[in-house]
Amino acid sequence: MTLDTALDTPPLAQPRGKPVSYFEFWPDWLFYFPVAAHWIALGLRHRGFMLPTAANPAITAGGLCGESKCEILDQVRGPARNLLARYTRVVAAPDGLATAEAARQAAAIEYPVVAKPDIGCNGTGVRLLRGCDDLARYLKAFPAGESIVLQEFVAEEGEAGIFYVRHPDEPVGRITSITLKHAPLVTGDGVSTLRQLVLADPRAGRVPHLYLPRLAHRLHEVPRPGERVRLVFVGNHCKGSIFEDGSPLATRALAASFERIARSMPDFHFGRIDVRFAALSDLLHGAAFRIIEINGAGSEATHVWDPRTTLCGAWLAQFQHYGTAFRIGAANRARGHRPCGLRAVYRLWRRQKRLMAAYPLND
């Protein structure tokens, strides 16, 4: 399989139905206002507003914000490490190409390589680098002195976010959410420019600001008849990927597989594990997938961004998951694990926001 084929030919059909829900791209403050109010109520009830930071005691702030991606991946032990896409961490410097290349080669990572910020979220700054020149440009554009993750590119097009939770008093955890992620595509007709295809697409045309800036150098191109053009690389909803609720597909085999992954990490109780795979049937049998990221208490049950999800259903899922995070945090507090203080979390959040504003534009 060539790189272009891997990027442009998805094995999963994009979901049918309405292209965008009416609340899908609301301002954050509007959608999350009831979620924030619920968080405050939970904090009052459990006597601790930052209890979710104790949900995963071995992760900085429980993974609520400001945590290192490598810090989490490094905690995976035993056979589960074989499921991780190979990765290494380098420090950004304008003259750091030789060091970064040495680290990449030592980790046995071949081009193309995925570069992403070690601290960040929402796919900000994630790029697909096809060669040494791309890496050099990325290093120069990245904030100097900050850490970058260089990760093996997993060519399989299927991508999913699997949410796992386990209360400390429970012998076995469970999968509470599955999100299937689809690449937004437009198909050429040999006449229309890429800009025209984007604006005419039922979904992309509703949110063109998500795609046009990163495609600026290609918007004049006229794709060949039948040629499919992927509009965004990173599998993140707010960057334009299409999310489908796959929660009803959860199987015992999948749950058992992710139980083993979670148990391979110290005190991991709450978070989303993002994977890539070739065939959905294999994933549901708990096999033939690769882990590209593990997120903690700040992760979201992203199935709520399926356009078919109702607003009440989305809010209910948020309430349920964060309620679980508080209960797990309270149980871990009773076991002796201290939550982070509000000031500490605020400092982590401020640093993360400052860094994200300085990262290069994602692919």
Image (cartoon, helix red, strand yellow):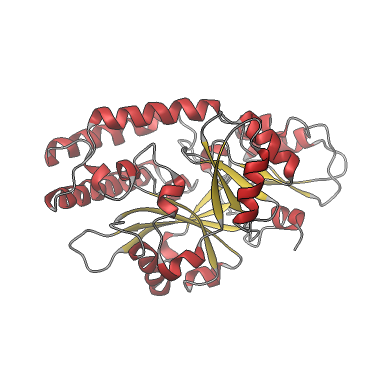
- In the rendered image, the quadrant that contains the C terminus is top right
Tell me, yes or no, if residue 232 can be seen here.
no
Residue 359 picture location, percent across and down: 56, 30
Q: Which of 237 and 329 is in front in this view?
A: 329
Q: Nearer the viewer, residue 360 or 146?
A: 146
Q: Which image quadrant for residue 212?
A: top right
Q: Nearer the viewer, residue 184 or 285?
A: 285
Image point 76% across, 53% down: which residue? 4
Q: In this view, does 318 lie above or below 142?
A: below
- In the rendered image, the quadrant that contains the N terminus is bottom right
Q: In this view, does 111 lie above or below 68?
A: below
Q: Report the side of 222 relative to 50 (left or right).
A: right
- Report the label total: 0
Image point 37% across, 72% down: which residue? 256
Residue 147 picture location, percent across and down: 51, 38
Q: Which of 161 and 250 is in front in this view?
A: 161
Image point 65% across, 62% down: which residue? 11
Q: Which image quadrant for residue 188?
A: top right
Residue 278 picture location, percent across and down: 61, 65
Q: Report the side of 142 relative to 336 (left or right).
A: right
Residue 130 picture location, percent across and down: 73, 47
Tell me, yes or no, if residue 191 can be seen here.
yes
Q: In this view, does 207 lie above or below 90?
A: above
